[in-house]
Image (cartoon, rainbow, N blue to C red):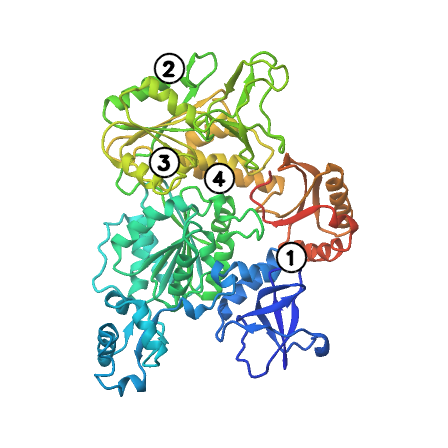
Amino acid sequence: MTVVRVALPVPLRQHFDYLIASDQPCQIGCRVLVPFGNRQLVGIIWQLAPDDGFDASKLKTVLQLLDTTPVLPPLLCQLLSFAAEYYHYPLGEVLISALPALLREGRNLTDYQPKAYRLTTAGLQLNSTALKRSAKQSALWQALQSHQLTESVLLQQHSRATLKQLLDKQLAEELIVPPVPFTPPLKPATGLKLTSNQALAVTAVDQACGRFERLLLEGVTGSGKTEVYLQSIAGLLNQQQQVLVIVPEIGLTPQTLARFQARFDVPVLCWHSALSDSERLHCWLQASTGAAAIIIGTRSALFLPFYRLGLIIIDEEHDQSLKQQDGFRYHARDLAIKRAALQHCPILLGSATPSLESLHNALNKRFIHLPLPDRAAGQALPVFELVDLKQQVLQFGLASQTLAQIKKQLGLGLQVMLFLNRRGFAPALSCQECGWLTECHRCSAFTTYHKQSRQLVCHHCGASKAVPRQCGNCGSTQLKPLGQGTEQLEENLQQLFADVPITRLDRDSTRRKGALHQALDDIHQSGARLIVGTQMLAKGHHFPNVSLVVIVDVDGALYSSDFRAPEQLAQLLTQVAGRAGRGSSGGKVLLQTHYPEHVLLQDIINNGYASFARSALKEREQTRLPPFQHLALFRAEAHQSELCQQWLQQLADCSRQISGLQLLGPIPAPLERRAGKYRWQLQLYSPARPQLHTALDNLLQQLHSWPLSRKVKWQLDVDPTDLT
């Protein structure tokens, strides 16, 4: 017996030693089934024969070695080990999270690998009359006479039952099909004519291939960033190198997938959480064998075991969806850069509104900066116009000036997009007698009224209940919607423009399978149409017939306690505005606000996002906020607010003993109560990243022994993007 060190998916920052037979072909990265307390867990072998192992007589034995070859190759193990160390998260949970669900459950990988069948020696020597009583078995036996058949080809003509009968008689045998990388395209892909800036960007990516290089593609909306991606990929496919394209949202994946499949005659697969477990495992296998040429996926696609990865592309690199907000809180963009360094391949970050962190790196020459300042087809950028709502009579939340411009564009047969970042019918119901509002009993938030389902839903914890008949305070029946959501805006627009078709794009309207595809198809049909939606409208969509974009309510995001709020609002406004004027007609953007003189709005309208971002960086530098300092956030949750405060205060007292740290807190979270628990936070700032991580290591070693640590639920978020 020999000792192996195993990483297990448990919330403990340690590994566990087990015994395994010396003749077992175990390697680092293989899965094992082991006893753990009264359970059996699937773990990953992390070290063979450790020098500091426990007394072998006290160790339990591995129940089963599940793999003979590693499911996590060495390079991927390096990446995951770095991630666990950087984000201070248990290694076992990080490793297991990188595997498809079926492998996490301990399923046999060979059951899902591509298979082929051939005759055994007995089958080859069989007399042709031996199977005359079974015509089906005889037909399959004859089909296997000349050569082996893959499972997919064999099952087109023969049943699985017939195959099983030959296998049981040992006349045929199963074998695993060896990895076969994809075949390069037979004919070169025909791309669009590039502008000079696009051509420079493609050349820069081509020159970076074969070595680690970080490139930031900053292109205005409609500048042809996707065409740069496509033409940068073409040369790599001819060399049989794979490409990973990470997109922030599942909703963007199908249209991106269709465009890549139309351009390249190679296997293009997608990866996201909406796939079934078997579909995800199939994609995982195709990546590991090199059979998949291009994989387009969301953030977890970063952990696929590629056979020959030649380029990583992060589309909309600024998007908050790239940051995991629970459990293992990694940022896909940052880990993708680390993976590119390990793979010795370039990484291309693309956005019309790059994050301040990426822009800071580009301005300091750590990234190669590739600007695309003009739209690819030569259209002018949309014109911004502020609509001052003060002292105006509003009709369904829309100013008369706004309605006049909507009618004008619809009269020309064009489309109008109305952006409102609140789904549902209304943010709350209000009593007209006493002013009572419908609140969530579990959160410090109001419940959103959904008229179609007749439900009050909390968008923070998911709690729902039927709409009350009476006020919960005075008993009045005079309950009216307060504020406006996309559902109400759609209903109101139907009254104002009865003959104009309306498409609503939000999480509620696209919940049903195929609903998003149908909605996008409706929009792409020519003719006048109103499009209503939330942030789903802001990301990557190309609507050539949209000439006017109306941002119904800008004010809700102007004032926030989060220092990232101005950056996120500027990105959102720029991205939404970029949907206008992408066709032959010009584009205009109307911003309805009570604060038209606000500095942020004036800067974006008059100078654009690029100017805003550079001035915002100067503000961050003056206030010593990221990216000029490094931030870690401790969150604490408990049913009693005092426990959170006491635990974080103890943590703050320990942190003050570490030189070089600046603290903010303990303070209540902006959303103080969620899902029945009170929430507090402590922010730790440091000018040097190594210094911050050393401090976090010291703190984590201490806090596990505190009695209060067993009474609160706490999380550590390194480089947080959401401070709510």
Q: Earlier in the sequence, mark 4 or mark 2?
A: 2
Q: Which residue is mark 4?
A: 613
Q: Nearer the viewer, mark 4 or mark 3?
A: 3
Secondary structure beneath label 3:
loop
* Residue 585, horizontal then vertical, whole percent: 25, 31
Name which quarter of the figure residue 153 lies in. Answer: bottom left
Name the secondary structure under disc 2. helix
Horizontally, is 709 left or right of 282 in the view?
right
- Name the residue beneath numbered marker 1: 11
Q: CA distance from mark 3 to mark 2?
A: 24 Å
Q: Residue at x 46, y 31 (%)?
A: 421
The residue to which callout 3 is attached is: 578
- Nearest the viewer among 375 and 428 is 428
User: Could you say where residue 470 lies in the image, as x and y percent from the top left?
Assistant: 57, 17
The secondary element bearing badge 4 is classed as: helix
- Real-space CA distance between mark 4 and mark 2, rounded to the nearest whole angstrom: 33 Å
Q: Quadrant of the C terminus?
A: top right
Q: Which image quadrant: the N terminus?
A: bottom right
Residue wearing tag 2: 400
Q: Earlier in the sequence, mark 3 or mark 2?
A: 2
Q: CA distance from mark 2 to mark 1?
A: 57 Å
What is the CA distance from the residue labelled 4 to the residue labelled 1? 39 Å
Dot placed on the residue nearer the N-terminal end, 4 or 3: 3
